[in-house]
C-alpha cells in the first residue's frame, strides 16, 4: 500500500463539522488529532465541536425534519441506494481509511464495507414498505386506522470498533423512516463517518438531514443535545456504563432510546461438536477485529472430554497468525485501538494466570511501535477470573471446561450480559434446547459470525434495548398513531 495513496486519501477527507449541508470549523476553532494505532502517529486533525456547534447541528436537523418526513418514500429509498452504490465504487478507499484510523487488517475492513454497506441497501428496500393498517373495530361501529410516523430528530452516537457499520446501521434506518439526525462518531475514529457523509452529499441528500459533530467535548455536547426538548430519540452503541448514563439523561425528555451495549458471549462446544467447524468458528468469533467486538466470544465453555484437543487446535491456528500493520499483506492481527487497551488486556490475562489458568500461547504486549498485544490462548481458566465477568475486548481466548449440559447452560447464563451466544453441537435436539435455554438476543448455532443487515441485532439483559437491522430496525425510528372514524 503506497504511503502516497494514504496521504492523498487522508487529505481529501474533510476535517470539519458537517452542519446544514456545510463543512465548518468548530466555533472556537478547536481541533483534535486522529491517530494510527499501528504507529501511534497522528494522521489528521478534525474539528472539536462546542456546545454551540452541537445546538447548531440540532437546529439544522429540526429545520430539515418536516420536508424530509414528507419526501416520498421512494425518493428517500433512492438516496440510500445511491449512497450504497457510491460506497461500492469507493470501497477500497473506505476500507483503507478504516484500517488507518482503527487498525483492523485491510481484508477485515473490506468485510466491514460489505457488511456496513448492506444497511444502506436493506433500508432503502424497507423504505417503501412502511405500512399501517385499516380495519373494522370489533363492535362494528367504526374504522380503526393505524399509521406510522417518523419519531423526529435523532441523536446517534457510535463507537470506534466498527466505524462504518455502526454509522450505517443507525443512519440508514433513521433516514428510511423519515427522521433527520445528528451523528457523533467516536473521537478515536471519526474519519470514516466524515467520508460517508460526503457520499450521502454526492447521492443528493438534502442539507440538514444528516449532521455530524466530531468532538472531544463529549459529555457537554451530548448533554446539550439530549437535554434539548426538540430531540425525540437517542440511539447509542458503546459501553454499558455510558449507555446507563445516557438512559438517565434521556428520561428527562421521555426520549425513545436504542441501546447497543456490551457483551460477554459464551461459546459452548459440546463433546459431539464437529471440532473442525468449532475451531473455525472460534477463530472468527474471537479474533475478528482483534477481539474488539461486542459480539466477540468472551468465554469458551468446552466439554471436558474435548477441551484439551480444542485448546491444542486453536493454539496451532493462533501461532500461525501474522501480526503487523493492517495494510501489510497477509496480516491477521493488527494493533489494539490504543495503549490503554493493551494495558487492560494484559491485566486481565495476568489475573487469570494468577488464579491458575494455563497460558498456551501469547500473554504479553508486543514490543514494537503502536499498540500491539499478542494473540493469546488460556485454558483451565478458574471461576472468579476477571475476564469471565468483563468484556475482554482484546485477542484473548479463554477456555473453561464443563461436565454436562446443565453445567454448560449455567455457565453460559452466568453473566449480566446477553448479546450473542455461540453453540457447537451436532445433536439437533440439544441445539434446540440451547436455543431455548440460553439468555441471549442472538445465537450462532454451529457458526461463529451471526451479524446480517437483514437480521435483528441486539441484546437481552445489560446488553441493551431495541434492535438494529432486519424488519425490526426501522421501527426503532417510527412511532404509531391510531385514528378512529365512525362507520361510513
Ligand atoms: P464508549 O461507551 O466509551 O464510547 C461509545 C461512544 O460514546 C463514543 O462515541 C464516545 O465518544 C461516546 N461517549 C463516551 N462517553 C460519553 C458520554 N458521557 N456521553 C455521551 N457520549 C459518550 O465505548 P467504546 O469504547 O467506544 O466501544 C466499546 C464498547 O461498545 C464495548 O462495550 C462494546 O461491547 C460496545 N459495542 C456494542 C455494540 C452492540 O451493538 N451491542 C457494537 C459495538 C460496540
Image (cartoon, rainbow, N blue to C red):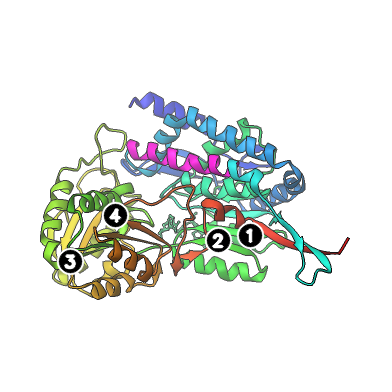
Q: Which residues are magenta?
A: 106-124
Residue at 62% x, 32% y: name it. 203
> Would you call the spot at circle 1 few (<14 residues within 10 Å), some (14-19), or many (20 or more)?
many
Secondary structure at numbered mark 1 = strand
Dot 3 or dot 2, earlier in sequence:
2
Which residue is label 2 attached to? 258
Camera-side mark, 4 or 1: 4
Dot 4 or dot 1, earlier in sequence:
1
126 or 144, nearer to the observer: 144
Distance from Cα at disc 1 to Cα at disc 3: 44 Å
What percent of the width, then of the height, locates residue 61?
69, 48
Distance from Cα at disc 4 to Cα at disc 3: 15 Å
Which residue is label 1 attached to? 233
What percent of the width, then of the height, locates residue 175?
63, 46
- Disc 2 and disc 1 in contact, CB within 8 angstroms: yes
- How many numbered dots are placed on residues in this image? 4
Distance from Cα at disc 3 to Cα at disc 2: 36 Å
Quarter holding the C terminus is bottom right
What percent of the width, then of the height, locates residue 39?
31, 40
Quarter holding the N terminus is top left
Which residue is label 4 attached to? 446
- Disc 3 and disc 2 in contact, CB within 8 angstroms: no
Secondary structure at numbered mark 2 = strand
Secondary structure at numbered mark 3 = strand
Dot 4 or dot 3, earlier in sequence:
3
Q: Magenta stretch: residue 109 in it? A: yes
Which residue is label 3 attached to? 303
Camera-side mark, 3 or 2: 3
Amino acid at each position: 500500500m503506497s504511503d502516497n495513496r494514504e496521504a492523498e486519501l487522508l487529505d481529501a477527507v474533510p476535517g470539519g463539522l458537517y452542519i446544514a449541508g456545510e463543512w465548518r470549523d468548530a466555533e472556537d476553532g478547536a481541533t483534535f488529532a486522529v491517530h494510527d494505532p499501528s504507529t501511534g502517529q497522528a494522521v489528521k486533525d478534525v474539528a472539536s465541536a462546542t456546545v454551540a456547534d452541537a445546538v447548531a447541528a440540532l437546529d439544522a436537523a429540526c429545520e430539515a425534519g418536516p420536508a424530509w418526513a414528507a419526501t416520498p418514500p421512494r425518493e428517500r429509498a433512492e438516496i440510500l441506494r445511491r449512497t450504497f452504490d457510491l460506497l461500492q465504487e469507493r470501497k477500497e478507499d473506505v476500507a483503507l481509511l478504516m484500517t488507518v484510523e482503527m487498525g483492523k487488517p485491510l481484508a477485515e475492513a473490506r468485510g466491514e464495507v460489505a457488511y456496513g454497506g448492506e444497511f444502506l441497501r436493506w433500508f432503502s428496500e424497507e423504505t417503501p414498505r412502511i405500512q399501517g393498517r385499516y380495519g373494522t373495530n370489533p363492535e362494528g361501529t367504526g374504522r380503526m386506522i393505524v399509521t406510522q410516523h417518523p419519531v423526529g430528530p435523532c441523536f446517534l452516537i457510535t463507537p470506534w470498533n466498527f466505524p462504518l457499520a455502526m454509522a450505517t446501521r443507525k443512519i440508514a434506518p433513521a433516514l428510511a423512516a423519515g427522521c433527520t439526525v445528528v451523528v457523533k462518531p467516536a473521537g478515536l475514529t471519526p474519519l470514516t463517518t466524515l467520508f460517508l457523509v460526503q457520499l450521502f452529499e454526492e447521492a443528493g441528500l438534502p442539507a440538514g438531514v444528516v449532521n455530524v459533530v466530531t468532538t472531544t467535548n463529549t459529555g457537554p455536547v451530548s448533554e446539550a443535545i439530549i437535554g434539548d426538548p426538540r430531540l425525540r430519540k437517542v440511539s447509542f452503541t458503546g459501553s454499558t456504563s455510558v449507555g446507563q448514563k445516557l438512559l438517565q439523561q434521556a428520561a428527562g425528555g421521555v426520549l425513545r432510546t436504542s441501546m447497543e451495549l456490551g457483551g460477554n458471549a459464551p461459546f459452548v462446544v459440546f463433546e459431539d461438536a464437529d471440532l473442525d467447524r468449532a475451531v473455525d468458528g472460534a477463530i472468527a468469533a474471537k479474533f475478528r477485529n482483534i477481539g474488539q467486538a461486542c459480539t466477540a466470544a468472551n468465554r469458551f465453555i468446552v466439554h471436558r472430554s474435548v477441551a484439551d484437543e480444542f485448546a491444542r487446535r486453536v493454539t496451532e491456528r493462533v501461532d500461525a497468525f501474522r501480526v503487523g500493520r493492517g495494510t501489510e499483506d497477509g496480516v491477521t492481527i493488527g494493533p489494539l485501538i490504543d495503549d490503554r487497551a493493551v494495558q487492560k488486556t494484559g491485566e486481565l490475562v495476568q489475573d487469570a494466570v494468577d488464579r491458575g489458568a494455563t497460558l498456551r500461547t501469547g500473554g504479553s504486549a508486543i514490543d514494537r511501535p503502536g499498540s500491539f498485544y499478542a494473540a493469546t490462548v488460556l485454558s483451565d481458566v478458574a471461576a472468579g477470573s476477571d475476564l469471565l465477568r468483563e468484556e475482554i475486548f482484546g485477542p484473548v481466548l479463554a477456555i473453561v471446561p464443563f461436565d454436562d449440559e446443565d453445567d454448560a447452560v449455567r455457565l453460559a447464563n452466568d453473566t449480566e450480559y446477553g448479546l450473542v451466544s455461540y453453540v457447537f453441537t451436532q445433536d439437533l435436539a440439544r441445539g434446540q434446547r440451547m436455543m431455548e435455554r440460553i439468555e441471549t438476543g442472538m445465537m450462532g448455532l454451529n457458526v461463529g459470525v451471526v451479524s446480517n443487515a437483514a437480521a435483528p441485532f441486539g441484546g437481552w439483559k445489560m446488553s441493551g434495548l431495541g434492535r438494529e437491522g432486519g424488519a425490526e430496525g426501522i421501527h426503532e425510528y417510527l412511532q404509531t398513531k391510531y385514528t378512529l372514524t365512525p362507520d361510513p
